[in-house]
Image (tube, rainbow, N blue to C red):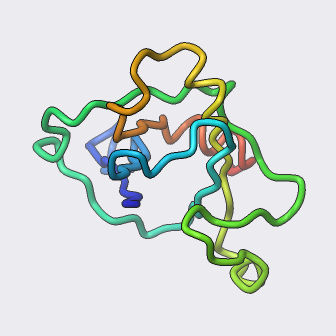
Amino acid sequence: MRIAAYCDFYTDSTRPLQLIVDARPGEMDWSKTLYIPVSGPFEPFAAEDFGDLPGVSVLLEDLVRPKEPPEFSGGSQLGLALSVPSLRVLGIRLPQIAARCGDLDEIQRLVVQMDDVEEVLGYE
């Protein structure tokens, strides 16, 4: 799974506008919430990287902040990682997205607005 940020010039500087989560076909379990680490700096994602990979927009109501330390997708424990203050975790409710999307086997990209990430995680 690849987590990257699409950055562009906004107001008076370049800033991350979208968080991009790319997965291989069948890698996402649409019956569970996907937990991902959210800390910068992010891997850059250029406009030409969007290509034609099938994806969906993640809405604000699809995002959650975990109450307890979850496991990252991919199996590694967060316990050790949570001791690093700069590391934050974001949950994406995949079942909620699955309820409004068509063929889930086709979807390989999730696009999250960075403003929504900041709102859920309480960034200033």
Instruction: Please tell me whether residue 92 is drawn above or below residue 79 in the rendered image.
Output: above
Residue at the (82%, 66%) spot, across then down: 69
Asked if residue 59 lies left or right of residue 86, the reply is left
On the image, the x and y values in percent for residue 16 come to 39, 49
Q: Quadrant of residue 118?
A: top right
Asked if residue 93 lies left or right of residue 27, the reply is right
Q: Please tell me which residue lies in front, 77 or 104.
A: 104
Instruction: Please tell me whether residue 115 is drawn above or below residue 24 in the rendered image.
Output: above
Q: Please tell me which residue lies in front, 51 or 10.
A: 51
Residue at the (27%, 60%) spot, across then down: 44
Residue at the (18%, 50%) spot, across then down: 46
Q: Quadrant of the N terminus?
A: bottom left
Q: Quadrant of residue 80?
A: bottom right
Q: Please tell me which residue lies in front, 69 or 117.
A: 69
Q: Please tell me which residue lies in front, 121 or 69.
A: 69
Instruction: Please tell me whether residue 25 is drawn above or below residue 42 in the rendered image.
Output: above
Residue at the (16%, 42%) spot, across then down: 47
On the image, the x and y values in percent for residue 41 come to 43, 69
On the image, the x and y values in percent for residue 5 come to 36, 53
- Number of numbered tags placed on the structure image: 0
Q: Is residue 82 visible?
A: yes
Q: Is residue 15 visible?
A: no
